[in-house]
Amino acid sequence: MAAVMAVGVVRAQDVVIKRDTVRDTIVIREVVREYILTSDTAKIAQVRSGEISKPEKKKQPIKIHFDFRGEWQSMFDARSSKEREFDGAEAYKSGFAGKYLQFYLDGNITEGLSYHYRQRLNRLNSIDAVFKSIDKAFMQYDFKSGWNIAAGKFPIAIGGWEYDAAPIDIYYSTEFWNQVYCFQLGIRGGYKFKDGRNSLVAEIANSPFNTVGKGMSNSMYSYSLLWYGDYDIFQSSYSVNVMEVKDGTYMGQVVLGNRFLAGPMTIELDWTNRFHANHNPFGDFSGVLNVKGDILGWATVFGKVDYDQNRTNLFEGMSDDEPYWIRYKDQLLTYGFGVEVFPIKKQRFFRLHAFWNQTLNVAYDSYKDYDLKRHNLTLGLTVDFTAFEIKK
């Protein structure tokens, strides 16, 4: 390589001597120096032959796209008329609804430095909602050594496969997923091991309880450590989290997200255990079992069971407006099944879906104004439209 560079330098000097004008000399010297520093013999040969041209600037990847989900929903409350009369609930109601309308912007500024933005346009119903409608707005730098660092607004690193899924892909969920506002400002660092199978994320962000309920402070944080593993038929999304729920009071979480792959079948099993000092360490938890099967690439069938339980009370004495995803003493069970159909061959930007689910409150001492026997039937479609894209 040194010999090639030496020959290139000598040749470059010859070329400069043969030029008569100062302008040509400067241009030749700059171009030759640029090519020689690359140690690229092909480019040096171009200089020798007189083909002097600067290389084109590499285009960085960028993608702008939208997605939309709309549905016809039907709800039937199977409680007795006396129970419904207590909270004024209707026995049956239905209608069309637009669930999601989202804007995405993802790309790279330079090699390794990327940006990510996602906003739910359907939530822009007030000035105060503008920032809250932004799920993601962060930048990340990936080092070649496997390390990365990110700062901005993103879903905090709670872990679990239901939690990790894009919201538009969740048809019904645990109350934990449905109620916790997980999109927070923060900073995180990560490392991907050389084997490509394991990665770690460490994060400090605002607590999800920052802006919820009464008497909350703005100086509350959450701390997370998350492990992703990929071992072919088994994938993990495990985490340990500590969140401040009010001044000086913390809640801990251990999340075990398990995914098993067996041919066309995928089984996801999540367990989220929440605990607090001086309370039952196993009294507050959520569990998810989701089984999905692919049918020749054009459809997916699934069956899912969600369970939430809260037998502890972190907010005793505050108010009835507890900033929590499931009220004290409630035990909620949701189960159902459904199908996704992709009618356009070998394409997934358009899908049709249909599902049924039922939600029960199985607690012995439950709130009477809570849906105890709720049936839902939903038919809908999802569209993912790419407006502009430059691939890497």
Image (cartoon, helix red, strand yellow):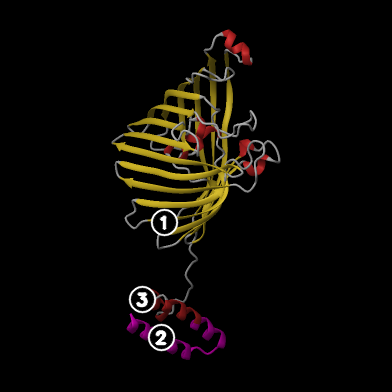
Magenta segment's dominant SS is helix
Residues shaded magenta: 1-29
Does 62 sit above or below residue 321?
below
**Looking at this view, is 296 or 160 the one in front?**
160
Extreme-top residue of the structure = 81
User: Any mark on residue 9, and which?
Assistant: 2
Extreme-right residue of the structure = 127
**Looking at this view, is 223 or 181 the one in front?**
223
Query: Closer to us: mark 2 or mark 1?
Result: 1
Q: Residue at x 48, y 24 (%)?
A: 332
Image check: 224 left or right of 258? Answer: right
Q: Which residue is mark 1?
A: 191
Q: What is the C-alpha distance between the residues marked 3 and 2?
A: 12 Å
The quarter in which the C terminus is drawn is: bottom left
User: Any mark on residue 41, and which?
Assistant: 3
Does 376 sit above or below residue 202?
above
Helix, strand or loop for disc 1: strand
Counting residues from the start of the chain, the first of labels 3 and 2 encountered is 2
**Looking at this view, is 30 or 111 the one in front?**
111
Mark 2 is on which residue type? Val
Residue 221: where, in percent of width, then height? 57, 48
Mark 3 is on which residue type? Thr
**Looking at this view, is 126 or 272 the one in front?**
272
Based on the picture, tell me whether residue 219 belongs to the magenta stretch: no
Residue 151: where, in percent of width, then height? 55, 54
Residue 74 is at least partly visible in this image: yes
